Image (cartoon, rainbow, N blue to C red):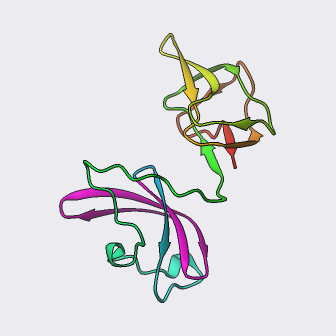
Amino acid sequence: MNYKIKINDAEYEIHIQNVEDTKAYVTVNDEEFEVDIEGLATDPTQMNIQTPSKSISKPLPTNNQKVKPVKTNISYDVKPPLPGVIMDICVKEGDQIKKGQVLYVLEAMKMENHIESDYDGIVEKIYYTKGTSVLENDVILNIT
């Protein structure tokens, strides 16, 4: 589930990835958090997230503040930053990868873009092959 919230004139994009008991695993502006929510419903569609700053175990980052992500057992979909053609896949399913490692090469607007991982993990699934045209919202591969 995705939400856009505004706190003290700062806008945040929140994606709820997983909910377990009284914890939710969320991404806030591309940073991961483990959130404790009192009175949490087991169905995330029933959650009331009107005042998340009161229930988040770590404060939301401000525009000038960087917060280190919390390591969780969540999978990540890797999508291209813009439409293009996959020129090379640099990993294979089952590979252990590190943050910053090149995952694939995308040709877009006559330029080669080396798409790097934002996370450490294992390549769970690769959905496209070399030579395939992809759009911005296509999931190229999944990391766990």
> Where residue 90 appears, x then y in whole percent?
71, 23
Q: In this view, does 87 lie above or below 66?
A: above
User: At which x and y percent is residue 73?
Assistant: 67, 59
Q: In this view, does 52 lie to the left or right of 144?
A: left
Residue furthest to the bottom: 39
Picture quadrant where residue 54 is located: bottom left
Q: Which residue is drawn at 56% across and 21% down?
A: 114
Q: Which residue lies furthest to the right in this view?
A: 94
Q: Which residue lies furthest to the front in this view?
A: 68
Residue 96 screen position, x and y as percent:
74, 38
Q: Where is residue 63 in the image (x, y as percent from the top left)?
A: 26, 50
Quarter of the view holding residue 84: top right
Residue 71 sits in which quadrant? bottom right
Which residue: 75% across, 26% down?
129
Q: Which residue is drawn at 66% across and 53% down?
A: 75
As displayed, is residue 115 above or below residue 26? Answer: above
How many marks can you see?
0
Q: Which segment is the magenta one?
A: 1-28
Residue beneath the point at 50% across and 63% down: 26
The residue lying toward the viewer, choosing from 76 and 132, is 76
Q: Please, is residue 119 above or below residue 41 in the view?
A: above
Is residue 84 or residue 124 the one in the foreground?
124
- Check if residue 137 falls in the magenta segment: no
**Residue closest to the far top:** 110
Q: Is residue 41 above or below residue 112?
A: below
Q: Does the magenta stretch include residue 18?
A: yes
Majority secondary structure of magenta residues: strand
- In the image, is 68 to the left or to the right of 25? left
